[in-house]
Amino acid sequence: MTRVTLTINERTRGADIAPRTSLADLLRDTHLLTGTHLGCEHGVCGACTILLDGAPVRSCITGAVACAGRSVRTIEGLAEDAVVAELRAAFTAEHALQCGYCTPGMLVTARDIVLRLPGADEARVRLELAGNLCRCTGYGGIVRAILRVLDARRGEAAPVRPAPLPAARFAPRLRDTGAGTGVMDPATGAPVAAPDAGPDGAPDRMRQVLMLDVPADQVWAAVRDPVLVVECVPGARLLSRQDDRLVGEMRVSLGPIQAAFGGEATVEYRTDAMSGRLVCRGQDQASGTRLSGEAEFHVIPDGAERCRLEMDMRYALRGPLAQFGRGPVVQVFATEIARTVGASLQARLRGEAAPAPPARLGAGRLMVRIVWRALKRLVSFRHDG
């Protein structure tokens, strides 16, 4: 493994990767920046286009090791960019997208055209787009959208006004607002407050907040003890620890399907803010399913004898078991783990007998919760109707 440190979307990031890892795989698998799409993986289609030191490159054929110390901007890092905002509005007005798969790379290239070639005509725009393939629109709408922004910037047309963005665009996404998801009391598993609902579709972000009847400084000390935390997690084992690097295993079962994810994690602590960040990556050897995730955690005092443990998580699951990473299943999994960890951690810190977490997280209780939530939603829907 090779240690690589680079600046991604104005944040310094480091990771241990195989020497032949592409920049696209580093961005997607390690840092969960999945707006960088993979198509041909031969540098032909342009779906993976990102900015490297300000210039567009094909990240699928760019070695991540070669980018050490350099600056990378992905489509996520251009969310607040003024030119991209104009292009988004123009793409919408000119119907310049259909399936959307090529759009992130197309926007990166379009931004480069607008900034580098302010006097470009239609022929030059089409030439510059030769490295970005679209199989839906025939390029007509895309070319018109770019020309619209160029004309507006030259004062030859009415300015393109970007569409207003949702105020909660970066809020963690949750599909489920039922009991047990969101802010919970570890003693009962009941919600303290309902979480915000997110858009439909498979979530890649989650938020869990545990209310603990323990002083914040004690919880923070416990959070910094990986051995103690892992002992509270169902199905988890810590195999080794070296400084901030952890190696472990987690066993999960869903009926006849059983998985044992082995992997490693890196954790960093910010003592002054009682917060930290965990980045993990693992694989189930039996199925070949890969899991990568990132979690920001924060201990917040709530009076002298009580605190909140907030966790914002992002994850990606790829492989045969990825179907279980969608919908209510993953939400119930996360909620059940958080509930168990919270109850066990609180009991240990208060000197009480902590219930032993199960050797593996099973499906029975999870399916009961899923069915119960579905019934509650059905009853609520009929009542409201």
Image (spheres, helix red, strand yellow):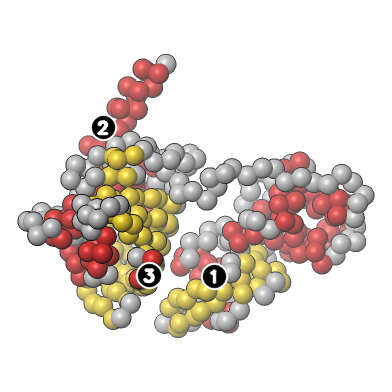
Q: Neighbour class for label 3 at 10 Å: few (<14), some, many (≥20)?
A: few
Q: Earlier in the sequence, mark 1 or mark 2?
A: 1
Task: Kindly identify the residue that appears in the image at 75 percent across and 60 percent down.
Answer: 111
What is the secondary structure assignment of the residue under circle 1?
A: strand
Q: Nearer the viewer, residue 98 or 76?
A: 76
Report the amino acid beneath label 1.
Answer: Arg
Residue type (three-letter) at the residue carrying disc 3: Asp
Report x, y in % for residue 359. 15, 58
Quarter of the picture containing the N terminus is bottom left
The residue carrying mark 1 is 11
- Give the residue at mark 3: 272
Dot 3 falls on a residue whose secondary structure is: helix
Please tell me which residue lies in front, 81 or 291. Answer: 81
> Residue 181, relative to residue 70: is it above or below?
above
Question: Quick one: 211 or 173, which is closer to the camera?
Answer: 211
> Which label belongs to residue 325?
none
Q: Nearer the viewer, mark 1 or mark 2?
A: 1
Residue 105 picture location, percent across and down:
66, 59
The residue that mark 2 highlights is 372
Marks 3,1: beta carbons within 8 A: no
Whether residue 318 sits left or right of residue 125 in the image: it is: left
How far apart marks 3 and 1 lie (CA) works out to 20 Å
Badge 2 amino acid? Trp
Residue at the far left in the pictured view: 353
Name which residue lies at 49% across and 80% down: 4
- Residue at left offset 66%, top offset 53%: 103
Residue 333 visible (yes or no)? no
Mark in front: 3 vs 2: 3
Which is nearer the N-term, disc 3 or disc 1? 1
Q: Dot 2, how many residues are within 10 Å of its Cα: few (below 14), some (14-19), or many (20+)?
A: some
Quadrant including the C terminus = top left
On the image, which quarter does residue 24 sit in?
bottom right
